[in-house]
Structures are given as C-alpha cells and as structure tokens.
C-alpha cells in the first residue's frame, strides 16, 4: 500500500526531503539489489516491448508514453510521462525496485535524483543496428533475471536478421528514400546519418536521401529538393496517416521530388519502424516490400 506523500517541507532542501520521503516506502531492504526485480519501471518503447516478450509484463509497474506496444502496456500500467521529461516523484510513487531506462531518458538531473534516493537505475544504449537490438535484448534479460529467455529471443532475432540480409542481397539498385519524422510549421524534420531512420533504411537496402545531415534535424526546402528522394517514408501518428495530398502538396519542397511525381509515400508506425526492438526485422521487411514491390518474397 502506498502511503500519502507528506507535505513538502519549507526551505532549500524541500525537494530532496520529498524524494527521501517517497523513497522510504520504495526501497527494498539492503542486499536485495542482487535479487530478481519484481517491480520494474520500463522507460522506452523497445524496453517495454522486450520485457513483455521475455514474459515479464506482470512485473512492470510503470511505463512512459513511448511504450505503445503491446497496447496493454499503456492501457494497464501507470504512465509516468514522456521519456525525456520524467519526474522523480512520479516514478518513486510506483515503488519500483529497478528502473530500466532507454538511451535519452531524462532529464539527467531526474535520473540523478532517483539514484540519490537509492533506486537502481540501469541505462540501456540503443545503437540502430542488428547488433544493437541483440545487445539490448541481452541487457534487458540480464537486468530482469531472464537470461535464458533472452537467449531464445536473441537466437530467433539472429535468424530473422539473416533472412532479411538474404532478401537485401537481391536488390540490384538501392532506391533513395527520405524518412520524415514530422512536418510542422513548414519545417521538414528528417532522419540523417546515425539516426534510427538511417539504421532502418540500411536494413531495408535503401539509400538515405538525407545522408548530408546527422541525426534527426530540420531539412531546408532547397536541401529536400536537391536530395531527390524516390520515396518518402512518414511516421503514422494516430489512426489516420498523412496522405499524399498533404505531404506532396503543390508548392512544397516534397511536392517537387521524384517521390511526389510517382506518388511514392509509405506511412508506418513510428515505434515499429524506428524502435529497434524485437519487431525490427519485420519492420525492415515491410519497408523493403513497400519500396521494392517487385522484389521476390521467398
């Protein structure tokens, strides 16, 4: 049972005192860190998905807003907010004995406060590559005490990545695509080199038309036209994805590309496409088939 949060004390140490009061009911007895965690806060869509795949869904006591799959995660678990805008109080209120945090979780000051309060916070790096996915599964499995289950999932993923590589080898010429994260206020935010967008394009055998920039950044109209993507891949946020009429609207930069002339637009769920979790081989395969419809499926 979670007790009431005591009134915030006055003075310069009020926040620290609040954290200490919250942590008093959250911390496990000394020495319990070596035991299997029974109350896990999963921060990051891929982290949550891996825990469910390993059979630890019932041990998750908190998720963040990026934990969109499986659907029951956000439906059934307490939501502690956006991955990069967490609050120490919200997490401590769920009394986790382990916090598994995807790369980029924060702010860093909040993670530091959680550690100060005595909570075990374990960061997980997320390189957008097959090796990165396998390492992520192994790390989450080790932290959750599910090493054997993680090994089984890793073996399955290796086989699927191998199948994907065989399909990729059949591509005669790499098409050029632009992964658009958002279209806001006339700014086209795209995925450049080193980003998860670049990683998924590589897996699907597609050339990144935004190779001139690094990470996720806005791209100027002139640069979009010059990049000449043959396909535009856009994030599907909500049940109704942006259609070609809006993405390739007359007078826009995207409307002046070869993709617009051919009406080549692919809309995919953001976590599925860019999460680099257990579904990544399928996401890359789906993207490959959308861009190369004539590629043999066997």
Image (spheres, rainbow, N blue to C red):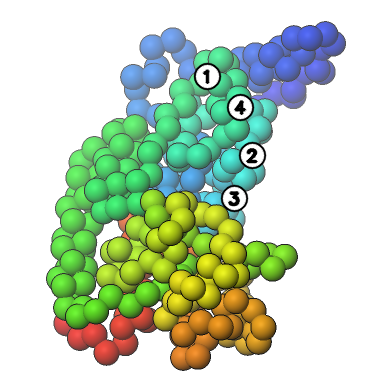
Q: 30 or 63: which is nearer to us?
A: 63
Q: Quadrant of the C terminus?
A: bottom left
- The secondary structure type at the circle numbered 2 is loop
User: Residue 216: x percent and y percent?
Assistant: 51, 54
Distance CA(mark 3)–CA(mark 4): 17 Å
Task: Tell me the residue at 21%/72% (across/down).
Answer: 168
Task: Tell me the residue at 49%/73% (across/down).
Answer: 226
User: Residue 279: x percent and y percent?
Assistant: 35, 61
Which residue carries the number 3 mark? 65
Which residue carries the number 2 mark? 85
Q: 37 or 280: which is nearer to us?
A: 280
Q: Is disc 4 surrounded by few (<14), some (14 to 19) or many (20+) residues within 10 Å?
A: some
Q: Which mark is residue 110?
A: 4
Disc 2 or 4, which lies upstream in sequence? Answer: 2
Distance CA(mark 1)–CA(mark 2): 17 Å
Task: Tell me the residue at 45%/47% (across/down).
Answer: 48
Q: Given contact means CB atoms under 8 Å apart, are the residues at marks 3 and 2 in contact?
A: no
> With respect to residue 95, does 34 lie above or below?
above
Q: Which mark is residue 29?
A: none
Distance CA(mark 3)–CA(mark 1): 22 Å
Residue 219 visible here = yes
- The secondary structure type at the circle numbered 3 is loop
Distance CA(mark 3)–CA(mark 2): 10 Å
Q: 288 or 87: which is nearer to us?
A: 288
Disc 3 or 2, which lies upstream in sequence? Answer: 3
Q: Quadrant of the N terminus?
A: top right
Disc 1 or 2, which lies upstream in sequence? Answer: 2
Distance CA(mark 2)–CA(mark 4): 9 Å
Q: Which mark is residue 115?
A: 1
């Amino acid at each position: 049972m979670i007790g009431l949060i005591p009134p915030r004390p006055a003075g310069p140490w009020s926040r620290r005192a609040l954290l200490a009061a919250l942590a008093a009911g959250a911390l496990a007895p000394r020495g319990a860190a070596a035991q299997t965690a029974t109350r896990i806060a999963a921060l990051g869509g891929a982290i949550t998905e891996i825990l469910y795949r390993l059979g630890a869904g019932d041990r998750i006591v908190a998720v963040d807003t990026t934990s969109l799959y499986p659907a029951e995660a956000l439906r059934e678990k307490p939501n502690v907010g956006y991955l990069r805008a967490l609050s120490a109080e919200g997490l401590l209120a769920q009394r986790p004995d382990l916090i598994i945090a995807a790369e980029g979780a924060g702010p860093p000051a909040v993670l530091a406060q959680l550690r100060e309060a005595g909570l075990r916070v374990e960061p997980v790096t997320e390189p957008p590559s097959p090796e990165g996915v396998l390492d992520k599964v192994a790390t989450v499995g080790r932290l959750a005490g599910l090493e054997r289950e993680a090994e089984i999932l890793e073996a399955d993923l290796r086989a699927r990545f191998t199948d994907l590589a065989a399909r990729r080898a059949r591509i005669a010429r790499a098409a050029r695509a632009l992964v658009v994260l958002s279209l806001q206020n006339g700014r086209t935010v795209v995925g450049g080199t080193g980003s998860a967008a670049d990683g998924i394009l590589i897996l699907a055998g597609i050339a990144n038309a935004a190779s001139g920039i690094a990470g996720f950044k806005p791209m100027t109209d002139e640069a979009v036209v010059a990049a000449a993507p043959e396909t535009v891949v856009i994030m599907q946020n909500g049940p109704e994805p942006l259609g070609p009429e809006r993405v390739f609207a007359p007078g826009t930069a995207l409307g002046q590309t070869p993709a617009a002339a051919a009406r080549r637009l692919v809309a995919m769920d953001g976590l599925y496409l860019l999460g680099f979790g257990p579904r990544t081989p399928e996401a890359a395969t789906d993207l490959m088939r959308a861009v190369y419809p004539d590629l043999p499926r066997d």
